[in-house]
Image (spheres, grey):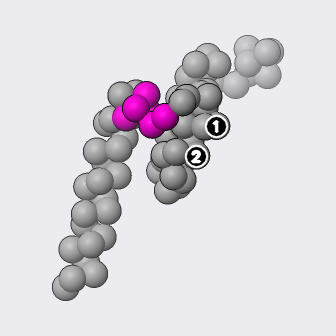
Amino acid sequence: MLKILKITPLLSTKGARHTYGSVLLHRGIDMGVIAKLLGHKDISMLIEVYGHTLQERVEEEYQEVRNILK
């Protein structure tokens, strides 16, 4: 279908799922909610799969706290 519609880059269902999870994390949605939406029993899988994304978010929020304290 993606080829017919000339949508690039081609994205697998797994890629779409990963993108969905990443977007939700970056929008500040609670990890428990995301885990439930993705069908996980808890957040441990999110931490494993999205660890790099979570680290970016921690650094951004750390900077936000520093700005508040200025």
Please provide percent x and percent y for residue 33. 58, 46
Q: Nearer the viewer, residue 28 or 36?
A: 36
Looking at the picture, does residue 45 appear above or below residue 25? above
Residue 33: image tag: 2
Dot 1 falls on a residue whose secondary structure is helix
Q: Residue at x 73, y 18 (%)?
A: 2
Q: Amino acid at mark 2?
A: Val
Residue density around tag 1, few if under 14, some if 14–19, many if 20 or more, within 10 Å: few
> What is the x, y in percent for residue 26?
47, 50
Residue interval drawn in magenta:
42-47
Specify the farthest residue to the bottom. 70
Q: Is residue 45 magenta?
A: yes
Q: Is residue 27 visible?
A: yes
Q: Is residue 10 visible?
A: no
| Dominant secondary structure of the residues highlighted in magenta in the image | helix
Residue displayed at 45% across by 37% down: 43
Specify the amino acid type for callout 1: Leu
Q: Quadrant of the C terminus?
A: bottom left
Q: Is residue 3 above or below residue 65?
A: above
The answer to which of 15 and 1 lies nearer the viewer is 15
- Within the image, what quadrant is residue 4 found in? top right
Q: Secondary structure at mark 2?
A: helix
In front of the other: 68 or 42: 42
| Residue at point 64%, 37% (across, down) | 37
Residue 65 percent across, percent down from the top left: 27, 72
